[in-house]
Structures are given as structure tokens and as C-alpha cells.
Image: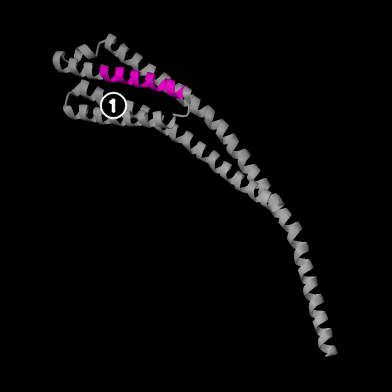
């Protein structure tokens, strides 16, 4: 009975420890995806500046490819955080802010084609772009702070589960030694006694 209970406890501890490790990995993946959103927007903005300064459809192609990766990363974040209501409330805000930033890129590209470089280099235009970038950065920063908070909690839980699993392993080992050594010694003594008795019987025959 005791062996069964200890075996079940060890199995449960191992499963819980694996689950905790999976949650830690899950949080790192969310952080990786939010980082990809930031990096993709930065690449898109860089390509946009290249187009505004020099023209050339190659810059627009690079921009659109970067924005496609941003969309993919946002979709992945949305899926990964389906268990977190706080993050889920931020996703529509993030999508809205990114859409506004993309619309601003497209409008500035149109103005560059139709009215030239000076119109998009004005302080007013630059200020609008900076404000749009800041809103996106601030929201992503909030999302990353939430994931960092969860990461601390999940790391602590993972460590606790690992300690619990190790404790159970030690208990099982000690119990096995306590049970098996006397059983082994008893077996040795019984074997020797039986052998001795058999020899006596042979001597009497």
C-alpha cells in the first residue's frame, strides 16, 4: 500500500513538474512573439523611411513583408494568451494601433508620390508618426510586463515542483532501502538455513 502511494505521488509530481516547465516555455514564447511584433514594426518603419527619402517600390515591398510578419506574430500572441483575460483585452487595442500605424504609412507613401518629399518631412507629420509609434510601444511594453510577472511566478512554481519531486524520490529511495535490505538479509539467512538443513539431511542419509 505504501509503495503504491509513493509511486502515485512520484508520478503526480513528475507530471506537475513537466506542466510547470511547459508554462515557463509558453511564457518565453509569448515574449518572443511580442519581440517579433516590435522588430517587425521597426523593419517596416525603416523601409518606409527609405521609400520616403529615396522612392523605389523595393522599399514598399520590404515594408509590406515586415508588416505581414507583424500580423503573423500578433495572431500567434492572441492564440498563446487565450488563457489570460488581461492580455486578451489588450490584443484588440494592439491590432487597432497597428492598423492605424499602417494606415499612416500608406498615407505618407501616397503623399510622397503625389506631393513630394517635403510634405512628409514636416514637423507635424513627424510628430504624428512618433505619437503612433509610442502608443504601440507602450502597449507592447505593458504586455511584456505582464508576461514577465507571470514568468517570475511560473519559475518559482517550477522550482517548487522540482523540489517536491526530488523529495519524493529521496523518500522512495530511503523507503526502498529500509524495506529491501531487511528482506534481502532475511532471504540470505533463509537460504543459508535451508542449505544447512539440506546438508544435515544428506549426512544422515
Q: Quadrant of residue 95?
A: top left
As drawn, the residue found furthest toward the left would be 114
Say left or right for 56 vs 26: left
The answer to whether 148 is drawn above or below residue 111 in the figure is below
Q: Residue drawn 38% across and 18% down? A: 93
Label 1 sits on a secondary structure element that is helix
Residue 183: image x %, image y %? Answer: 76, 64
Main SS of the magenta segment? helix
The answer to whether 173 is drawn above or below residue 69 in the figure is below
Say left or right for 193 vs 29: right
Residue 26: image x %, image y %? Answer: 47, 36
* Residue 88 painted magenta: yes
As drawn, the residue found furthest toward the bottom would be 205
As drawn, the residue found furthest toward the front would be 205
Q: Residue drawn 85% across and 89% down? A: 204
Q: Residue drawn 59% across and 46% down? A: 14
Which residue is tagged 1?
44
Say left or right for 55 vs 37: left
Q: Quadrant of residue 92?
A: top left
Mark 1, residues whose alpha carbon is within 10 Å: few (<14), some, or many (≥20)? many
Q: Quadrant of residue 182?
A: bottom right
Provide the residue span drawn in magenta: 86-103
Quadrant of the snapshot with the C terminus = bottom right
Residue 117: image x %, image y %? Answer: 19, 16
Residue 74: image x %, image y %? Answer: 36, 28
* Residue 154 painted magenta: no
> Which residue is more in the foreground, 129 or 162?
162
Q: Residue drawn 76% across and 62% down? A: 181
Amino acid at each position: 500500500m505504501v509503495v503504491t502511494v509513493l509511486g502515485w505521488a512520484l508520478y503526480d509530481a513528475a507530471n506537475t513538474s513537466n506542466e510547470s516547465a511547459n508554462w515557463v516555455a509558453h511564457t518565453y514564447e509569448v515574449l518572443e512573439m511580442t519581440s517579433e511584433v516590435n522588430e517587425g514594426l521597426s523593419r517596416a518603419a525603416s523601409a518606409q523611411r527609405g521609400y520616403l527619402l529615396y522612392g523605389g517600390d523595393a522599399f514598399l515591398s520590404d515594408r509590406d513583408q515586415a508588416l505581414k510578419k507583424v500580423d503573423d506574430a500578433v495572431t500567434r500572441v492572441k492564440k498563446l494568451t487565450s488563457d489570460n483575460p488581461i492580455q486578451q483585452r489588450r490584443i484588440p487595442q494592439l491590432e487597432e494601433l497597428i492598423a492605424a500605424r499602417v494606415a499612416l504609412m500608406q498615407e505618407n507613401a501616397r503623399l510622397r508620390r503625389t506631393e513630394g518629399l517635403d510634405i512628409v518631412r514636416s514637423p507635424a507629420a513627424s510628430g504624428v508618426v512618433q505619437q503612433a509609434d509610442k502608443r504601440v510601444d507602450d502597449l507592447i511594453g505593458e504586455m511584456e510586463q505582464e508576461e514577465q510577472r507571470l514568468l517570475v511566478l511560473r519559475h518559482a512554481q517550477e522550482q517548487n515542483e522540482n523540489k517536491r519531486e526530488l523529495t519524493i524520490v529521496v523518500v522512495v529511495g530511503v523507503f526502498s532501502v529500509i524495506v529491501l535490505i531487511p528482506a534481502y538479509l532475511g532471504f540470505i539467512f533463509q537460504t543459508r538455513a535451508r542449505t544447512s538443513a539440506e546438508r544435515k539431511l544428506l549426512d544422515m542419509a
